[in-house]
Amino acid sequence: MKTHEASPLSDYVEYPVDEMLQRSADFYENIKRRHSIRNFSNRPVAKAIIENCIKSAGTAPSGANHQPWHFVAIHSDEVKKQIREQAEIHESNFYQGRASEEWLDALKPLGTDANKPYLEHAPWLIAVFSEKKGGITIEEKNTNYYVHESVGIATGFLINALHTSGLVTLTHTPKPMSFLSKVCNRDENSRPYMLIIAGYPGEGATVPHHATTKKALEDIATFL
Ligand code: IYR
């Protein structure tokens, strides 16, 4: 049995209530400007910014603090090209038959198709992997817990960090995503979870109206 050692909470910051109210409102104003963008500029973005965003993602809570995630940040044109080629093959199959009519109908208002030029244009692709086995250090190969939940939260942190840094993103889930493991040299313990595209918006980037329709507070929350 491991012993439970702890230190006092020393970095908590308490704000006056009116400031708290302001900060929560400001956070909402900031996060509601996050949009999924499909038109990226090829303008470079410093690696240090991506590193900070990944470090932020790495602070997410996780099952037993095993941090069952790995981020592959892709800047190489060659690797981006491979990802685009593979993703477009799978997406073509998806749009030309594998997807149900209902699914295709649901996607129509977003205007998506099998063409994924942003996979080559954007300066950074961040492939998020979940790790089946792990532990508090990367050498360990113990059971990981709540892997999906943990990686989902970390990915949310990552998207928030990228947005707050001043970049736009797209949450992309090519289906199937298994090709990402090979392209990113991950072993069978790693499972592709999501691909985040990050960069500056391309000229004339748009936001589909469908994507800006957010449910009202009373529709998404119940207060008891
Ligand atoms: N992966 C495809 C299809 C797609 C699926 C959903 I659900 C979306 O919200 C958006 C797209 C694509 O990237 O085009």
Image: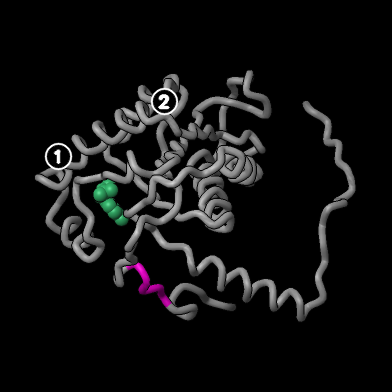
Q: Nearer the viewer, mark 1 or mark 2?
A: 2
Mark 2 surroundings: few (<14), some (14-19) or many (≥20) residues within 10 A: some
Q: How many numbered dots are placed on residues in this image?
A: 2
| x then y, percent, for residue 141 | 58, 20
Is residue 199 magenta-colored?
no
What's the CA distance linking mark 1 and mark 2? 22 Å
Mark 1 surroundings: few (<14), some (14-19) or many (≥20) residues within 10 A: few
Residue 126 seen in render: yes
Q: Is mark 2 within 8 Å of ligand 1?
A: no
Q: Name the amino acid type tagged 1.
A: Asn
SS assignment for the magenta stretch, majority: loop
Tell me what residue is drawn at x 26 percent, y 44 percent. Answer: 116
| x then y, percent, for residue 99 | 16, 48
| x then y, percent, for residue 27 | 61, 69
Tell me what residue is drawn at x 22 percent, y 38 percent. Answer: 88
Question: Compared to 117, does 188 lie above or below?
Answer: above
Circle nearer the N terminus (1, 2): 1
Foreground residue among 6 and 167: 167
Would you identify the image quadrant in which residue 29 lies?
A: bottom right
Tell me what residue is drawn at x 48 percent, y 32 percent. Answer: 72
What's drawn in magenta, residue-wise?
211-215
Q: Secondary structure at mark 2?
A: loop
Quadrant the N terminus occupies: top right
Q: Which residue is mark 1?
A: 93
Q: Which mark is residue 48?
A: none
Q: Which mark is residue 184?
A: 2
Q: Name the amino acid type tagged 2.
A: Cys
| x then y, percent, for residue 113 | 19, 51
Tell me what residue is drawn at x 41 percent, y 75 percent. Answer: 215
What colour scheme has been applied to the protein in the rendered image? one colour
